[in-house]
Image: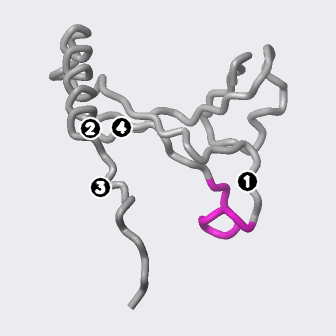
Amino acid sequence: MSNVDYSNTRSQCWNKEQVSKWFDAYQTLATSLGIIDLPTHIWNTDETGCQNIHRANSVVGVVGKPSYNLITINAVGDAAPVMITHKGKNVGKQWSNGAPRDTLVRTSTTC
């Protein structure tokens, strides 16, 4: 038997009042935008852990095939095109080499 301390697990650290306030604010915003009943207009992007250079020892995928993270989906399961954002002002000519077809390559000065 492990002596793991579970007193600080995520399920015990959430604040019910804070979570309720977030959902109330979300509902107010979605209603004011007119998308509360339009799941095709509600998107989620998870950019955590994304990187533009993958090390071979940290990628899980099919050997010999490119590996990409799918990080943006809407509430009905549609995926947005892959988009690579580099820091800078201009897109380099070869920045999309090897990327999947229809990949969007953009820049951001605040990236």
Binning the other alpha carbons within 10 Å of mark 2 as few (below 14), some (14 to 19) or many (20 upward) gives: few
Three-letter code for the amino acid on which mark 3 is drawn: Gln
Secondary structure category for the residue under label 1: loop
Residue contact between numbered discs 4 and 2, judged by CB atoms under 8 Å: yes
User: Can you tell which quarter of the image residue 32 is in?
Assistant: top left
Among numbered discs 1 and 4, the one appearing first in the sequence:
1
Residue holding disc 3? 12
Residue holding disc 1? 54
Question: 30 or 89: which is nearer to us?
Answer: 30
Secondary structure category for the residue under label 3: helix
Magenta stretch: includes residue 102: no
Three-letter code for the amino acid on which mark 4 is drawn: Asp
Q: Quadrant of the C terminus?
A: top right
How far apart in space, not on screen, are marks 3 and 2 (Cα)? 30 Å
Residue holding disc 4? 78
Residue contact between numbered discs 3 and 2, judged by CB atoms under 8 Å: no
Residue contact between numbered discs 1 and 4, judged by CB atoms under 8 Å: no
Magenta stretch: includes residue 64: yes
Three-letter code for the amino acid on which mark 1 is drawn: His
Among numbered discs 2 and 1, the one appearing first in the sequence:
1
Front of the two marks 1 and 4? 1
Is residue 37 placed above or below 58 in the rendered structure? above
- Which numbered tag is attached to residue 76? 2
Front of the two marks 1 and 3? 3
Among numbered discs 1 and 3, the one appearing first in the sequence:
3
The residues colored magenta run 57-67
Coordinates of residue 45 in the picture (x, y in percent): 46, 35
Binning the other alpha carbons within 10 Å of mark 3 as few (below 14), some (14 to 19) or many (20 upward) gives: few
